Amino acid sequence: MTNEMRAVMVEAFGEPEVMRVVDVARPEPASDEILVEVRAAGVNPADWKVRRNGYWLTAPWVPGWDVSGVVVSVPAGENRFAVGDEVFGMPHFPRPAGAYAEYVAAPARHFARKPATVDHVQAAALPMAALTAWQALTEAADIKSGDRVLIHAAAGGVGHLAVQIAKTLGAWVIGTASAGKHDLLRELGADELVDYRTADFGDLREVDVVIDLIGGDDYESRSMRVLKPGGLYIGMTNPGALPDLQAAAEKLGVRAATVFVAPDHAVLERVAELVERGEVKVLIAETFPLEDVVKAHELGESNRTTGKIVLTV
C-alpha cells in the first residue's frame, strides 16, 4: 500500500469548480480508528453547502461524510470488524471526514456492516440521509403507530428514506412532491400525496408531526398551522433557527424542534436490517466517478434529483 491516495481537494470555498482531484497523503489511523478503502462516497446537501460557504470548517478541505468500503486495517482491541469486512458509515460529522478520497480513517463505532443485499453505491447513499430521518422520526418526534406525519420534499435524499422509515414505525405518511413522483412515493409506502405545484398542503389538518426538508418562512408558518394542538414541527434546514421556530410554534399552540445529525453505529445497524428485509430501499439518482465531482455537485445543487447522488472511487 502506497502512502499516497487520490482525493478531492477544496483549496478555497466557493463554486463547484474549486474542487479538484489531487494526490495527498493517505490518512494514518489513530489508535481507536479503522482504515477503510473507499469504494463509494455519498453526496449530500451538507457537502455542497459547506463547499460554498465554509461555515464551521476551514480550507483546505476534503469534502464528504458518507462512505462505503472495505476495512484494510484495525487497531488492537477492535472486535467488531476485521480486515476485509465491508462497512458503511458517516464518520466524524460535523468534523471533516474526507470521504471523497480513496481511504478514510475513523473510529470503528462510526461504522456498521454494509447491508449484504446492496452494493457499495447504494450503501454509500444511506448513512447521512438515513441517520437524519431516523433521528428526526424516533428521537425528536417519537413517532407512534397511527401518527399522521407530513414530509416535505418526500422524494428527495432524506425524504424518500423518511417516508419508508415512518411506515416501519406505523405512521400514516403524507408527502409533498411534484405529481410525476407520486407513483414512486406510493410504491415506497406514502399514504397520501400533495402536488405542491397545484394544491396547498396548508389545507391539511390534524397532523401530528411535520418533517420540513425545505424551510423558509412560508413553509414553516403553513406547516405549523396544519398541526393538531401540541403537534410537532421539525425544521431540518437550519438548526440555528430553533429559538425563532419555538417562539412561532408556541404562539400557535404547537411545538418545534430540529435535528443536527450525529454518527450512530447502532442506528446504522437497524437501517441495515431494514434494508436487508426489503422494508427500506435507497434510490440512486446518478453516479459519477471521483474525477467528475464538479458535475455531481452541479446536479445536486439543481434540486431536481430523486434520491441520492453517489461518487464511485
Image (cartoon, rainbow, N blue to C red):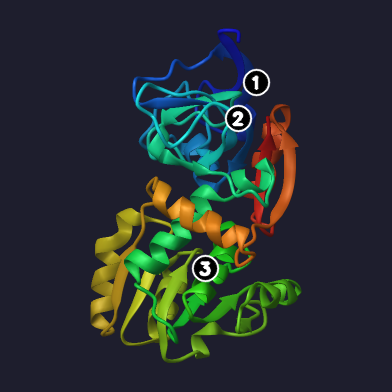
Res 69 label? none
- Picture layout, residue 60 above or below residue 236: above
> Quick one: 52 or 258, which is closer to the camera?
258
Vertical side of 77 occupied by 46: above or below: below
Amino acid type for the residue under numbered disc 1: Val
How far across and down, in percent of the image, does residue 222 sit? Answer: 44, 80
Crowding at dot 1, Cα within 10 Å, few <14 / some 14-19 / many 20+, comes out as some
Q: Earlier in the sequence, mark 3 or mark 1?
A: 1
The residue at the point 36 percent across, 20 percent down is 30
In front of the other: 207 or 241: 207
Question: Callout 3 environment at 10 Å: few (<14), some (14 to 19), or many (20+)?
Answer: many
Q: Could you tell me residue 95's position as x and y percent?
A: 38, 34
Residue 25 location (% of width, % of height) = 52, 11
- Pick whichever of labels 2 and 1 is earlier in the sequence: 1
Q: Is residue 128 left or right of residue 118?
A: left
Q: CA distance from mark 3 to mark 2?
A: 27 Å
Q: Is residue 232 visible?
A: yes
Question: In the rendered view, does 204 fall on the left or right side of 84?
Answer: left
Q: CA distance from mark 2 to mark 1?
A: 15 Å
Q: CA distance from mark 3 to mark 1?
A: 36 Å
Q: Which residue is mark 3?
A: 165
| 12 relative to 282 in the view: left or right | left
**Picture coordinates of residue 255 (x, y %)?**
28, 76
Kindly report which numbered mark, 3 or 1, lies closer to the viewer in this rendering.
3
Mark 2 vs mark 1: give the one in front: 2
* Residue highlighted by disc 2: 38
What residue is shown at x 43% (from left), y 84% (from top)? 147
Residue carrying label 1: 21
Q: Is residue 127 above or below residue 162?
A: above
